[in-house]
């Protein structure tokens, strides 16, 4: 069985104003004890790692590039040893990097220990906007980090951008996109996420007090479609709602999740999906550090076959290619057009889905109303 591995690093220099991920600033003194705990957890799951084929490893956060790179190497070496991995180049191994938190030497160490894909959190090339959302870097620091990444030999690089940011206009967005495609080595993957206002975040409080304004829904949708058209015109394939890639550089880790493949998560608040069971580690750092592996896990869902079919549809409809009807039949032995005939009939009627010979996929209108589509399969 193929599985993916996710490792969560919850440390940051400073939390961004919009962030509600499980992460902590000013706790880097705990990094050694945390990494030792992650390695203990990996050891406790050695049978799972030994007996399955690991196809992807993703190190996310938080900001993984804030910690000592020797700890990243230690985590990977532990996985490689337990799973008896000899050919690291056959695995997509990604680490998230924020500009201003990684030196050229650190990036070289990532490369040396087997990491072959970087995901760099840029968000915007406008320094005023970056400051407004609480990012600690500037566009100039991004350029340094990006150029160092190229110099040490990384060829597979994703750049993150955001839409609907405070005071952001189409002109700001155009400038960011042009700056990216004018880089000396153009990134082969771009992720584009819309700002979501989460409860309790600093940005929500600033909006509530009138200190900030964000683009309205129509303006945000215009930004999305402008980005889609721009990147497609420059050779990127729009393969998932928020993701664009040059041919062959789609994120394998994320694609596997959208195709309902299995993965195991290590670290604080890390999620896993194994044999139809979804579970998550505790999001309490003290509990995570001070308890044995089995006591830090909470089962979120023990899926029935019906649950799995619905989720297969929901996840698959994130991808622009949509759901392969033949893949659904192969996995479940049934035809989704029959099982979900009522739901599909409604969505096709409102021009949100297209059903053809072997696929069920979103229309252009469906891209804007994807939440309505997904709700049919919840």
Image (cartoon, rainbow, N blue to C red):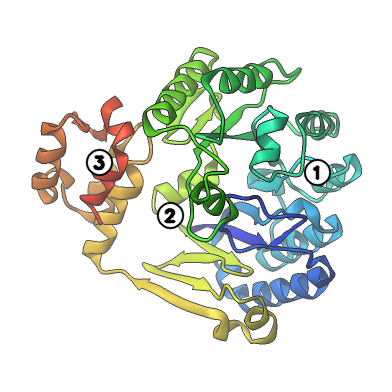
Write down the quadrant of residue 157 in the picture: top right
Badge 2 local density, few (<14 within 10 Å), some, or many (20+)? some
**Rendered position, 110 above or below 353:** below
Q: Is residue 303 left or right of residue 170?
A: left
Residue shown at the point (40%, 72%) measured from the top left: 300
Q: Is residue 33 left or right of residue 5?
A: right
Q: Is residue 103 left or right of residue 322?
A: right
Which mark, residue 261? 2
- Marks 3, 1: nearer the viewer: 1
Q: Which residue position holds label 1?
A: 111
**Percent from the top left, x then y, of residue 298?**
47, 78
Q: Which residue position holds label 3?
A: 326
- Give the mark nearest the N terminus, 1 or 2: 1
Badge 1 local density, few (<14 within 10 Å), some, or many (20+)? some
- Give the mark nearest the N terminus, 2 or 3: 2
What is the CA distance from the residue labelled 1 to the residue labelled 2? 27 Å
C-beta proximity under 8 Å, tags 2 and 3: no
- Marks 2, 3: nearer the viewer: 2
Q: In the displayed image of the protein, which residue is found farthest to the top? A: 233
């Amino acid at each position: 069985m193929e599985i993916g591995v996710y490792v969560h690093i919850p440390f940051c220099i400073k939390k961004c104003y919009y962030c509600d991920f499980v992460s902590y600033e000013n706790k880097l003194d705990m990094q050694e004890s945390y990494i030792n705990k992650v390695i203990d957890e990996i050891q406790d799951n050695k049978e799972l790692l030994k007996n399955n084929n690991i196809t992807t490893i993703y190190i996310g956060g938080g900001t993984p590039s804030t910690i000592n790179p020797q700890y990243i190497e230690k985590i990977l070496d532990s996985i490689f040893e337990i799973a008896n991995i000899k050919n690291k180049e056959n695995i997509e191994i990604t680490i998230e990097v924020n500009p201003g938190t990684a030196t050229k030497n650190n990036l070289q160490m990532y490369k040396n220990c087997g990491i072959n894909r970087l995901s760099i959190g840029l968000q915007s090339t406008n320094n005023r906007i970056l400051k407004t959302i609480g990012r600690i870097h500037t566009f100039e620091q991004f350029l340094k980090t990006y150029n160092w990444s190229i110099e040490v030999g990384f060829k597979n690089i994703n750049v993150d951008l955001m839409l609907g940011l405070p005071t952001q206009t189409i002109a700001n967005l155009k400038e960011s996109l042009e700056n990216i495609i004018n880089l000396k080595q153009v990134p082969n993957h771009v992720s584009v996420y819309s700002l979501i206002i989460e409860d309790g975040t600093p940005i929500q409080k600033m909006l509530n007090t009138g200190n900030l304004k964000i683009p309205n829904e129509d303006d945000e949708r215009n930004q999305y479609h402008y980005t889609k058209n721009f990147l497609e015109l420059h050779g990127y394939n729009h393969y998932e709602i928020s993701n664009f890639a040059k041919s062959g550089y789609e994120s394998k880790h994320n694609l596997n999740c959208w195709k309902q493949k299995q993965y195991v998560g290590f670290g604080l608040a890390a999620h896993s999906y194994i044999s139809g069971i979804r579970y998550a580690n505790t999001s309490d750092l003290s509990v995570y550090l001070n308890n044995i592996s089995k006591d830090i896990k909470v089962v979120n869902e023990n899926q029935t076959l019906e649950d799995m079919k619905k989720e297969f549809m929901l996840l698959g409809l994130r991808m622009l290619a949509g759901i392969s009807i033949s893949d659904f039949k192969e996995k479940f032995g049934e035809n989704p057009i029959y099982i979900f005939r009522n739901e599909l009939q409604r969505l096709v009627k409102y021009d949100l889905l297209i059903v053809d010979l072997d696929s069920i996929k979103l229309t252009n209108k469906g891209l804007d109303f994807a939440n309505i589509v997904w709700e049919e399969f919840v």
